[in-house]
Image (tube, grey):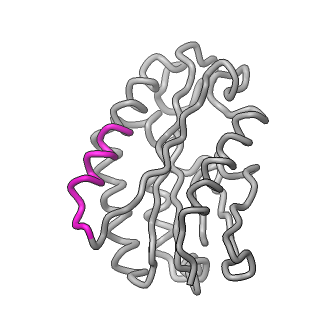
Amino acid sequence: MLLIGDSLLHHVRKPTTTPSESVETHIESIGGCTIDRLIALVQQEHFGSLFRNQKHLIIAIGTNTLAREKSQSAIVKFETLLRLILRKYSYLTTIAVCTVPDRTKTSVFFRTYGDNGGKSIRKRIRNYNRKLKKLRKNQNKSKRFSIIKLDFDLSVHVSSDGLHPNAMGIEHLSSALQNYADTLKIT
């Protein structure tokens, strides 16, 4: 199993499968990762070595893309990423995509590009997640991806900067990923 995405994945526990020796889980956490960067990485041959011998893929997109652009443009880019992965790694048995967890409205974390301290990021997250569900619904059944819903309780799971998960948020993410792994049929 391969998990790729932004720094949300940095501290999560590796999901295990049953039987546990059947699947090796690899997490590729890319700080500051955007969908554009994932597309560029997936196109590189040496990055493809991460996919070798993998059957299951989980993609975690964070707020880096949504801080720079609107949800519609992010969904179009995600669809491009998905098509690329399906074309290059057609042997994958499952692909799952995490929703982007909500952030607090009063985020004090300013990014270099856009976001203006959280004033528009919550709306972009909600729109992106809604469009992600619609994209999944419209996918051909043979190429349909699963959605792993990452719901944060903003008073419990988010650090004081209003953007990043705290220790309880990381545990919540780890549990959601493990719950998904528990549903996989490992052969």
In the image, residue 70 lies in the stretch drawn in magenta = no
Left or right of 175: which side holds 57? left
State the residue lying farthest toward the top: 106
Residue at the image position 64 percent from the left and 46 percent from the top: 8
Number of marks in picture: 0
In the image, residue 133 lies in the stretch drawn in magenta = yes
| Residue 2 picture quarter | bottom right
**In the image, residue 168 above or below residue 116:** below
**In the image, residue 162 above or below residue 172:** above
Q: Quadrant of the C terminus?
A: bottom right
Q: Position of residue 16 (x, y in %)?
A: 71, 66
Q: Quadrant of the N terminus?
A: bottom right
Q: Position of residue 64 (x, y in %)?
A: 52, 41
Q: Position of residue 54 (x, y in %)?
A: 57, 80
State the residue lying farthest toward the right: 167
Residue at the image position 70 percent from the left and 23 percent from the top: 156
* 32 vs 28, nearest the viewer: 28
Residue at the image position 79 percent from the left and 35 percent from the top: 167
| Residue 92 picture quarter | bottom left
Identify the magenta region. 129-141
Residue at the image position 33 percent from the left and 32 percent from the top: 127
Q: Position of residue 41 (x, y in %)?
A: 51, 68
**In the image, residue 56 above or below residue 170:** below
| Residue 173 picture quarter | top right
* 7 vs 114, nearest the viewer: 7
**Magenta-colored segment: predominant secondary structure:** helix
**In the image, residue 135 above or below residue 107:** below
